[in-house]
Amino acid sequence: MAVNIPGLVAVIVFYVLILATGIWAARKSKQEEKKCSGDRSEVAMIGGRNIGILVGILTTTATWVGGGFINGIAEIVYLPNHGVGWAQAPISYCLNLIFGGLFFAKPMRSNRYVTMMDPFQIKFGNLMTSLLMIPAVLGDIFWSAAILAALGATMAVILDIETYLSIILSSCVVIVYTLLGGLYSVAYTDVMQMIFIIISLWLCVPFTIINPAVADIKYTMVNYLYQSPWIGKIEVNQICRWIDDLLYMTLGGIPWQVYFQRVLAASSVSQAQKTSYIAGVLCFTLSFPSIIIGAVAVSTDWNQTDYGLPTPNERQESSMILPIVLQYLCPVYISVLGIGALSAAVMSSADSSLLSASSMFARNIYKTIIRKTAAEKEVIWVMRTTVILCGAAATTLALLTNSIYGLWFLSAELVYAILFPQFVCVLFIPNTNTYGSAAGYLVGLTLRLLAGEPFLRIPPLIQYPGISFENGTYRQLFPFKTFTMVLSLLSIVMFSYLASFVFSRKLLPVRFDVFKITDKTQDFPATPEEQITLNDCNNHKLEPDKNHM
């Protein structure tokens, strides 16, 4: 197979446009920094809380509607014995953003936090914050690596170029414009990427449906033709697992810095909430092209196409079903647009993840723990250095590791088991403390690791009811992810109140109170020093948005 010259040219042109947009946005970021000279790092991290509502909606949507989203939905719909019934991303991503807007956007934005970790640092201290950052940062890096690897594999099949070339090129483009303009560059390139994704994918859909090799997708939805119907089927013994996965994707997707970057960048609480609601609806709507393309793949007689037999599933290329459909069922000029859309989707997720990890490290580790007297310029350079390091780590993993998705799934489940219950407690349960946080962390981490990970072929040491052994791996049908999360939440609350009771009643001497919870009031407000460090306010105190309290 020769190099797909039109596709390669289209991808290069698109990358140049994205890079130019990032450079233009970087100039806007510099102008904003001059207006807010005392808070330059906040401009880089959250756009100086000056991101417009339209840009905010599109950048939030683009972060969720990434390469994993559009490729993954098409793959699940296409896979035999899965189908659209198991494509939970459209529902869960929509609910994720709506719940985030309803319950979490207001307390985060009204308190003028800069990163998701700020409330943890105020309430639980530096040690627990550092531990809680581990799954969050690893999740960002592994996710960037996973989608870069997926893009590399796709380009190798569609454009017939070396995998490492597309991975390195994509990574370099993302790192450069993220370095130059921080959130401004990420947000404005997301706008272009989002528009490109919407136009390209919807243009591709009609051409795939009318291809002569494709049967009526309404017929194959419920009838067996070339493979199982694409409507899918959920067996009775799989219902608990289905609900568990839905809750995991819905609630576990909330405590991520990539989301709160957008919430905290909004000019008001009201705008942050509206951004979340509308982006949730858009995520659901933008899943339709991928669902249709997956259905088309199920309905295709591949022997009538240049792809031929065996089918993509038999060749174990199901993960690339969307680009395969675009290439073999669409005219060249349309498939080229689709390839550009895939590139856009990948970069719109990778840039946000890199900025997320670097922002948390620069602010909550370097500025607050390592070097408290660091100037704004120094913090920005630390953040830029971290972007390069995280980008290099993600690129290396994408090039060298075959189990990146497994690593990401595990880290994402740790976020659900550990970080989500901690996040609920830090925002809504006032009397929780560092002892409870440590106990919840230990319970969540231990139970999740002992449950095993089939993607990484880690056998479970805890075998919950209904466990099965399929294709050489164990499958937990019990809703163990949500079970672990609930136990972690209960542990935080119980051990917090136990610690408060023990020290307040002097059942243990105060000298054993290593986390100093007896030095704080019942509601554990931040000390003046913590307030200054975490909010960098000129008047040395927290100033919530009074108009939105």
Image (spheres, grey):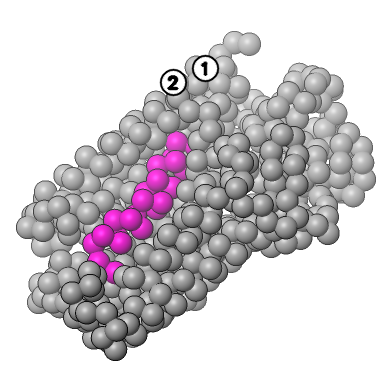
Q: Is residue 272 above or below residue 481?
A: below
Q: Using the image as rendered, state which of residue 349 and residue 542 is in the foreground.
A: 542
Residue at the image position 41 percent from the left and 51 percent from the top: 135
Decide whether residue 126 is among the magenta residues.
yes
Percent coordinates x, y for residue 174 in the rendering: 36, 37
User: Which amino acid lies under the numbered mark 1 shown in the image of this protein?
Assistant: Ile
Q: Please tell me whether the stretch drawn in magenta is mainly helix, strand or loop.
A: helix
User: Which amino acid lies under the numbered mark 2 shown in the image of this protein?
Assistant: Leu
Q: Is residue 142 visible?
A: yes
Quadrant of residue 328 in the image?
top right
Residue 165: mark in rendering: 2
**Considering the numbered disc 2 on the image, is that residue within a helix, a strand or a loop?**
helix
Percent coordinates x, y for residue 521 in the rendering: 23, 86
CA distance for labels 1 and 2: 7 Å
Q: Which residues are magenta?
A: 124-146
Residue at the image position 26 percent from the left and 51 percent from the top: 361
The residue where tag 1 is placed is: 161
Percent coordinates x, y for residue 334 in the rendering: 63, 32
Residue 295: mark in rendering: none
Q: Residues within 10 Å of mark 2 (few under 14, many from 20)?
A: some
Quadrant of residue 260 in the image?
bottom left
Q: Is residue 535 visible?
A: no
Residues marked 1 and 2 touching at CB (< 8 Å) = yes
Quadrant housing the N terminus = top right
Residue at the image position 13 percent from the left and 77 percent from the top: 528
In the rendered view, does 19 fall on the left or right side of 192? left
Residue at the image position 60 percent from the left and 36 percent from the top: 457
Percent coordinates x, y for residue 414 in the rendering: 48, 54
Q: Is residue 364 above or below residue 320?
A: below
Decide whether residue 514 is among the magenta residues.
no
Quadrant housing the C terminus = bottom left
